[in-house]
Every structure is written in C-alpha cells, then in structure tokens.
Image (cartoon, grey):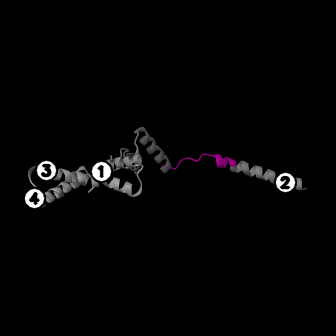
Amino acid sequence: MKLEVSLAAAAVAAVFLLLQGTRAFAVEPLTPPQQRMRACNTQADGKQLKGGERNHFIRACLKGANGNGHRLTPRQKQSQACNEQAKQQGLEGAERRGFMSQCEKPALAQQRPEKEKEKGCSRRADQRGLSGEERAKYINGCRSASAATGG
C-alpha cells in the first residue's frame, strides 16, 4: 500500500514537473522597453561610447531621440578626465575631494591663487621698503616658499 502511494505521488510530481518545466525553461519575448534598451546598447557599442558619453547617448536613445544623444560639455569632459586621474592615483575621501575640486577648476581659476600669492609677496616687499634687486630676490623667495608650503 505504501509503495502504491509513493508511486502515485512520484507520478503526480513527474507530471507536475513536466508541465511546469516547459514553462520555466521557455524564453519569454522581450517587452518593448527591453527591446529598445537592447537596441540602444547595441548602437552605443557600435559607436564605441564609454562613460558619460555612453550614458547620455543611452538616455537620449531611450527617450526616442534620433540616437545621436548630445555630446558632453567641456566641463563634463574635464570632470570625467579628473575622475579617471583620481581613480588611477587611488585617491579616496578628503584627498579625492580636494584633488577633484582643484582638477575641475577652469584653468583661469587655477591661476588665481598664484596671482594672489604674488600680490601678497609684493605687498610684504613694499612694507619692508625693498626695491631693485633686493625686492626681486625677496619676491622670488617668497613665491618659492608659498609654493612649497601650499599657501
């Protein structure tokens, strides 16, 4: 009797697995958003886009744009380049934030601190009443010391 129940249970389980198994292994067709995502990714691969440009392209493509997407602005490109440099240098935390803020500044803004240092050195030379060669020597030393101490 136990053997018959076990065989019957096994038969029911086998029939159940056969019916569910085909459903479990069946490949469901992709939904339209999934098809669009696949097409956009294929296009981005074809254009060999990476990083931010790829993200912009994919977003534009998914919104139904003509597939070109917009190019990164110079500032976005600079940010991406700085990010890569920070990764290569293995920077983290405060070090990374400091590096990124300096790196992302426009070239003019990076030069401003140098001009400020020079003005400070020149002002101190004036206060000391230096002129001629003494003044030039003092200002060069002052700039070197400012650069060495970072301020």
Q: Which numbered disc covers residue 136?
A: 3
Q: x and y percent of residue 119 in the render?
A: 16, 56
In the displayed structure, would residue 65 be above or below residue 47? Answer: below
Q: CA distance from mark 3 to mark 2?
A: 103 Å
Q: x and y percent of residue 109 in the render?
A: 23, 54
- The label nearer to you, 3 versus 2, is 3
Which residue does the numbered mark 2 point to in the structure image? 6
User: Would you say 54 lies left or right of 133 here?
Assistant: right
Q: Considering the numbered disc 2 on the image, is that residue within a helix, a strand or a loop?
A: helix
Residue 111 seen in this snapshot? no
Residue at left offset 77%, top offset 52%: 13
Q: Which numbered disc covers residue 75?
A: 1
Disc 4 or 2, which lies upstream in sequence? 2
Which residue does the numbered mark 4 point to in the structure image? 129
Disc 1 or 2, which lies upstream in sequence? 2
Q: Considering the numbered disc 4 on the image, is that residue within a helix, a strand or a loop?
A: loop
